Image: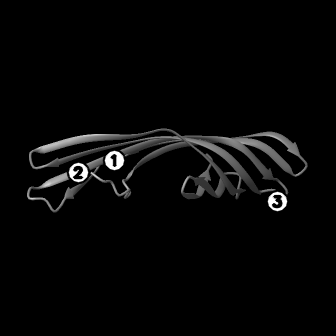
Amino acid sequence: LQFDGSSIKGFTLAAEVTAPLKKAGEFEIGAAGRFAYSFGMSKTWPLEGFAVEGEASGQPSWMEISAGPRVAYLFFGRVVPYVELSARMLWANLRMSETLGELSGEAKKRVKGDFAVAIALGADAQVTTRIAVKAKAGIMPFAGGVDGTISIAALYGF
């Protein structure tokens, strides 16, 4: 089988923590860390162009841990822009199976500890005492290219 990298739906659980370490005037130097785990749902598609019927299925899962320094600019009060540098480790699994007539097979591909460095610009905005908005965009260079990330989150505190 050759997997074309199309999307497979799934669920992701994630947590993020930031901790201020030192304040220097309007700047705050801190640390940021993230953990994410995603388990994909199985996706099935037909195998076409054969004399007999067949189908393939795939199921991914991955885990990412990242941490690094964060420098925030506190001048604007409720809106806090920041720059963040992080080191990331990624572990991923993809289980594929196929059935073609009476033949069947299964394969697993694993990524163990893929390391990358990323840089991001973002801002946290405290809209009210209970509502906050976060936005971040970044890049992660790798051999042969650059990945980009964009995230926007709305938070409500109880």
Q: Nearer the viewer, mark 3 or mark 2?
A: 2
Q: Secondary structure at mark 3?
A: loop
Q: Secondary structure at mark 2?
A: strand
Q: Earlier in the sequence, mark 1 or mark 2?
A: 1
Q: Amino acid at mark 3?
A: Phe
Q: Amino acid at mark 2?
A: Ala
Question: Which residue has dot 2 on it?
Answer: 56
Q: Position of residue 107 (x, y in %)?
A: 28, 41
Question: Which residue has dot 1 on it?
Answer: 41
Q: Position of residue 157 (x, y in %)?
A: 63, 47
Q: Is residue 1 left or right of residue 16?
A: left
Residue at horizontal 65 percent and vertical 56 percent from the top: 134
Q: Nearer the viewer, mark 1 or mark 2?
A: 2
**Residue most toward the right?**
25
Choose between 119 and 103: the one closer to the eye: 103
Packing grade of label 3 (10 A; few <14, some 14-19, many >=20) is few
Question: Which residue has dot 3 on it?
Answer: 76
Taking 71 as reference, is 63 above or below it? Answer: above
Q: Earlier in the sequence, mark 1 or mark 3?
A: 1
